[in-house]
Image: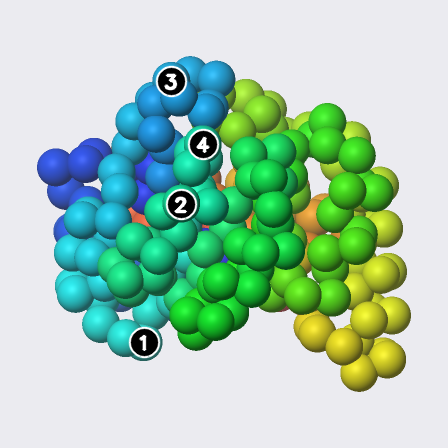
């Protein structure tokens, strides 16, 4: 399983150092949460293409970068994130009017396309898009609202998606990756892997004041080896 640190919990004055520490610990994929102060419930503004471009310059081409767009205008601004150097753009289905067109635009620009959905989103809205998606991100908390607990009720949707993707692969289709984000720590990482998750976003479970990223990553990995 791929562990993807979210730098949202980092001291923003030390983002470069935190990213370096994560890479030194063995991380190969970094998750970038973009909030516009409008779409998510806590009205937080995080960072945008300029900061992401600086991170890309710092980490070089070998580290995989995704951006999770919790914004209202992903359809109008996706190219700014591609130009900033991300490998994958993940947008909320609830915030995009024409998702097939967004997927087409991203693929046309040489970028992977991902979809993220909330715990309350009907799974039937996602299924028709699966064949063209590189990744589906299941939120296991309400996006943008800090301090929430992991919501185990997302299991059914994840197992449904896992079955559909496996069928898709067996028929020669795209190997759409399944990711989860929200309340993921060492005590539940093995559970979500058993459901069929291949990549997990981890924020405070990795980047906190209780231990180094390397030690926290070791604790998480010890649960899934």
Tell whether label 3 touches label 4 (CB within 8 Å). Answer: no
Which sits earlier in the primary sequence, circle 1 or circle 2?
A: 1
Tell whether label 2 touches label 1 (CB within 8 Å). Answer: no
- Is the residue 77 above or below the residue 45 in the image? below
Which sits earlier in the primary sequence, circle 1 or circle 3?
A: 3
Q: Is residue 103 visible?
A: yes
Residue at 25% from the left image edge and 49% from the top image edge: 49
Q: Is residue 208 visible?
A: no
Tell whether label 2 touches label 4 (CB within 8 Å). Answer: no
Count of numbered tags: 4
Say which of marks 1 and 2 sits in front.
Answer: 2
Question: Where in the figure is residue 24, as x and y percent of width and height?
Answer: 26, 65
Per the image, label 2 sits on a secondary structure element best described as helix
Name the side, left or right, on which 21 lies relative to 193.
left
Question: Where in the figure is residue 72, as x and y percent of width and height?
Answer: 45, 32
Kindly identify which residue carries mark 4: 72
Mark seen at residue 76:
2
Which sits earlier in the primary sequence, circle 4 or circle 3?
A: 3
Per the image, label 3 sits on a secondary structure element best described as loop
Which sits earlier in the primary sequence, circle 2 or circle 3?
A: 3
- Alpha carbon of mark 2 to alpha carbon of mark 3: how far? 20 Å
Name the side, left or right, on which 74 lies relative to 116.
left
- Alpha carbon of mark 4 to alpha carbon of mark 3: how far? 12 Å
- Alpha carbon of mark 1 to alpha carbon of mark 3: how far? 33 Å
Kindly identify which residue carries mark 3: 43
Question: Where in the figure is residue 203, as x and y percent of width and height?
Answer: 42, 40
Q: How is the model colour-coded? A: rainbow
Say which of marks 4 and 3 sits in front.
Answer: 4
Say which of marks 1 and 3 sits in front.
Answer: 3
């Amino acid at each position: 399983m791929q562990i993807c640190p979210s730098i949202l919990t980092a001291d923003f004055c030390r983002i470069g150092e935190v990213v370096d520490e994560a890479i030194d610990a063995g991380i190969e994929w970094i998750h970038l949460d973009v909030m516009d102060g409008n779409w998510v419930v806590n009205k937080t503004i995080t960072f945008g293409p300029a900061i992401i471009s600086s991170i890309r310059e710092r980490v070089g081409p070998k580290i995989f970068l995704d951006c999770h767009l919790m914004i209202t205008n992903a359809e109008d601004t996706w190219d700014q994130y591609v130009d900033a150097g991300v490998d994958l753009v993940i947008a909320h289905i609830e915030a995009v009017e024409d998702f097939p067109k967004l997927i087409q635009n991203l693929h046309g620009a040489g970028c992977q396309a991902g979809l993220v959905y909330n715990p309350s989103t009907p799974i039937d809205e996602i299924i028709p898009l699966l064949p063209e998606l590189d990744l589906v991100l299941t939120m296991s908390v309400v996006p943008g609202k800090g301090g929430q607990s992991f919501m185990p009720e997302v299991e059914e949707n994840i197992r449904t998606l896992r079955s559909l993707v496996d069928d898709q692969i067996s028929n020669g289709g795209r190997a759409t990756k399944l990711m989860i984000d929200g309340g993921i720590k060492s005590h539940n990482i093995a559970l979500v892997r058993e459901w069929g998750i291949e990549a997990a976003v981890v924020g405070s479970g990795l980047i906190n004041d209780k231990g180094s990223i390397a030690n926290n990553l070791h604790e998480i990995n010890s649960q899934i080896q």
